[in-house]
Image (cartoon, grey):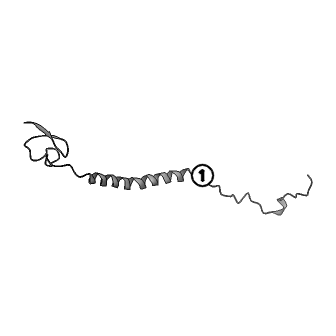
């Protein structure tokens, strides 16, 4: 008895078997249509793009330099501390 590969999964089966021992499909059957592969790839891409984009934006947000806030204690509104430009040193 010769062994033939299953057309669905590729497992070697005997010639007279009705179902594949590995996948359970008819060994002479055809492979699944390629549309299932394309749909699976599209789903993975649709899930991966937002995740990668969010991670990239988070990294850029973490690396963004912080703007310094003015310290109100260093700001003086007293007029006596303003140097007089006409006064000689």
> Which residue is the site of mark 1?
65
Q: Residue at x 44, y 52 (%)?
A: 52
Relative to residue 84, is residue 41 drawn left or right? left
Dot 1: element: loop
- Residue 68: percent from the left, percent from the top? 65, 55
- Outermost residue, top direction? 1
What crowding class fits label 1: few (fewer than 14 Cα within 10 Å), some (14-19), or many (20 or more)?
few
Relative to residue 20, is residue 80 drawn left or right? right
Q: How many marks?
A: 1
Relative to residue 31, is residue 45 drawn left or right? right
Which one is in front, 5 or 84? Answer: 5
Residue 76, by quadrant, is bottom right
- Residue 36: percent from the left, percent from the top? 27, 53
Q: Residue at x 85, y 57 (%)?
A: 83
Which one is in front, 82 or 12? Answer: 12
Relative to residue 3, is residue 84 drawn left or right? right
- Residue 2: percent from the left, percent from the top? 9, 36
Q: Residue at x 18, y 49 (%)?
A: 30
Q: Residue at x 50, y 54 (%)?
A: 57
- Residue 58: percent from the left, percent from the top? 49, 53
């Amino acid at each position: 008895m010769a062994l033939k590969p299953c057309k669905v999964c590729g497992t070697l089966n005997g010639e007279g078997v009705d179902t594949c021992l590995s996948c359970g499909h008819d060994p002479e059957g055809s492979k699944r249509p390629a549309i299932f592969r394309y749909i699976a790839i599209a789903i993975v891409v649709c899930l991966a793009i937002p995740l990668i984009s969010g991670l990239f934006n988070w990294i850029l947000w973490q690396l963004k330099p912080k703007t310094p806030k003015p310290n109100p204690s260093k700001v003086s509104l007293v007029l006596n501390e303003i140097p007089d430009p006409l006064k000689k040193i």
